[in-house]
Structure formats: structure tokens, C-alpha cells
């Protein structure tokens, strides 16, 4: 039987989903950390991401990132140095992979990778970033808003960085009724690693999510 290239692509996609589900379903609980690939190790945001991941790892959470440089590298490094697993979910030809990974998963298809980044997370931590980070935070907000994903904390880190976007959410999106005022409650904004950990462990928060 001759299969057309597009048919073969369906099987490739299925195989990537199966591999990802088999690997990542066993690492719970985990936290997915997003942020820019452009920050260097000397940057305060890099150092903050590393600290957050280290504390989360020692608190029992595996750390999942996109596997690349910048904030992803910092988070994988913090997780790698901590007591839980550090996982990278990457597109191997898109960027240089960082070396701080106990488990490395490479996906050819961008949308498969995005599913793996969000599917098993017990929380999403969003550090400063650019268009890629905005794409990822928009996706997790949409999934949680529409009950298509787990009702888990969505934590923006560094209030000074996100203030402009959050004010736009409130003053433009809410005012024009493209989102509901209560949708803003999906987001928690913090500045420190301790606040990230405390938010995730806040029992009242989880009760409100479920």
C-alpha cells in the first residue's frame, strides 16, 4: 500500500504524541516555566528563573521548559541542581539546547511540543519574554479560561515587566467586554521565588481553581 506524504505525516504526529505522553505522564507533579531565550546568565531575570526552579525542584516539582537558552536554560539549571527532574521539550533545529536536562524530548512538530509543555503542568510560571512567551501565555490563559486545560495557577513573575500588559487587559479588553472581569483572576503576579512557591502551595488557591 502506497501512502501519500501527508498520510505519513499523520503517523509521525501520532508517534510524537505517544512518545511525549509516555515520557511526561510519569513526571508529575511538574511546573512549566516560560520566558525569553535572550537573557544571559548575568541578567537578573536569568538568575531569578534559576532560583525559582531550584526552589520548586526542592519542593518536589519537576521543571519543564522549552529546552533552549535564556530563561529556559536558567530554569532547567535550577531544576537540575535541585532534587527533582529537569525536562526540556524542544525543537532541535530551532535553537541551541541547554545541557541541564535529565530528560530531553525533541519534537519535529511545533504544536505537539506546545501540547507537551502545557498538558501535565501543576502550574505555569511566566517570566519576562517576547513574542514566543506571549504566544505561550495566551495559550495557557485561553485553555484555563475555557476549561480546556487543568485549572492550575498561572503566575506572572516581575510586576514591573507585566504591568503594561495587565493594564491593557483591564482597561481595553475588559472595558470592551472581550474578556470578563473575573478572567483577570486567572493570573497571579509575583516578584520573588518564595511567592511563586507559596502561590502554588496555597490551598485556598487550589480550592478556587477546582
Image (cartoon, rainbow, N blue to C red):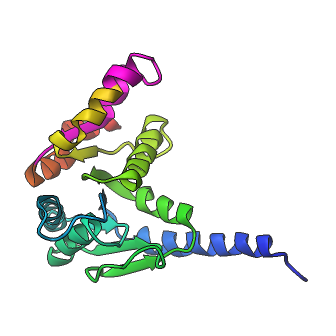
Q: Foreground: 86 or 29?
A: 86
Residue at 40 percent of width and 41 percent of height: 141
Residue 207 visible to an observer of this rendering: no
User: Residue 40: where, in percent of width, then height?
Assistant: 19, 69
Looking at the image, residue 42 sits to the left or right of residue 101; the answer is left
Residue at 55 percent of width and 60 percent of height: 111
Q: Quadrant of the N terminus?
A: bottom right
Examine the rendered structure and indicate whether residue 49 appears above or below residue 73. above
Quarter assignment of residue 31:
bottom left
Total numbered labels: 0
Examine the rendered structure and indicate whether residue 202 appears above or below residue 25. above
Quarter assignment of residue 177:
top left
Examine the rendered structure and indicate whether residue 129 appears above or below residue 174. below
Magenta-highlighted residues: 170-191
Q: Foreground: 174 or 95?
A: 95
Residue at 50 percent of width and 69 percent of height: 21
User: Residue 181: where, in percent of width, then height?
Assistant: 35, 21
Examine the rendered structure and indicate whether residue 102 appears above or below residue 144. below
Q: In which quarter of the image is the C terminus?
A: top left
Amino acid at each position: 500500500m502506497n501512502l501519500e506524504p501527508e498520510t505519513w505525516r499523520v503517523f509521525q504526529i501520532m508517534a510524537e504524541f505517544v512518545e511525549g505522553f509516555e515520557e511526561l505522564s510519569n513526571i508529575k507533579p511538574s511546573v512549566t516555566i516560560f520566558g525569553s531565550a535572550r537573557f544571559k546568565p548575568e541578567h537578573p531575570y536569568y538568575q531569578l528563573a534559576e532560583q525559582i526552579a531550584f526552589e520548586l525542584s526542592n519542593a518536589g516539582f519537576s521543571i519543564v521548559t522549552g529546552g533552549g537558552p535564556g530563561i529556559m536554560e536558567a530554569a532547567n539549571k535550577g531544576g537540575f541542581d535541585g532534587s527533582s527532574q529537569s525536562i526540556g521539550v524542544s525543537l532541535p533545529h530551532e535553537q541551541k539546547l541547554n545541557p541541564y536536562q535529565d530528560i530531553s524530548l525533541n519534537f519535529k512538530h511545533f504544536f505537539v511540543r506546545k501540547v507537551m509543555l502545557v498538558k501535565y503542568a501543576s502550574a505555569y510560571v511566566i517570566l519576562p519574554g517576547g513574542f514566543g512567551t506571549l504566544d505561550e501565555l495566551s495559550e495557557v490563559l485561553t485553555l484555563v479560561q475555557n476549561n480546556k486545560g487543568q485549572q492550575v495557577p498561572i503566575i506572572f513573575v516581575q510586576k514591573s515587566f507585566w504591568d503594561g500588559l495587565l493594564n491593557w487587559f483591564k482597561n481595553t479588553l475588559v472595558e470592551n467586554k472581550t474578556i470578563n472581569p473575573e478572567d483577570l483572576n486567572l493570573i497571579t503576579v509575583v516578584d520573588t521565588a518564595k511567592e511563586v512557591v507559596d502561590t502554588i502551595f496555597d490551598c485556598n488557591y487550589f480550592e478556587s481553581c477546582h
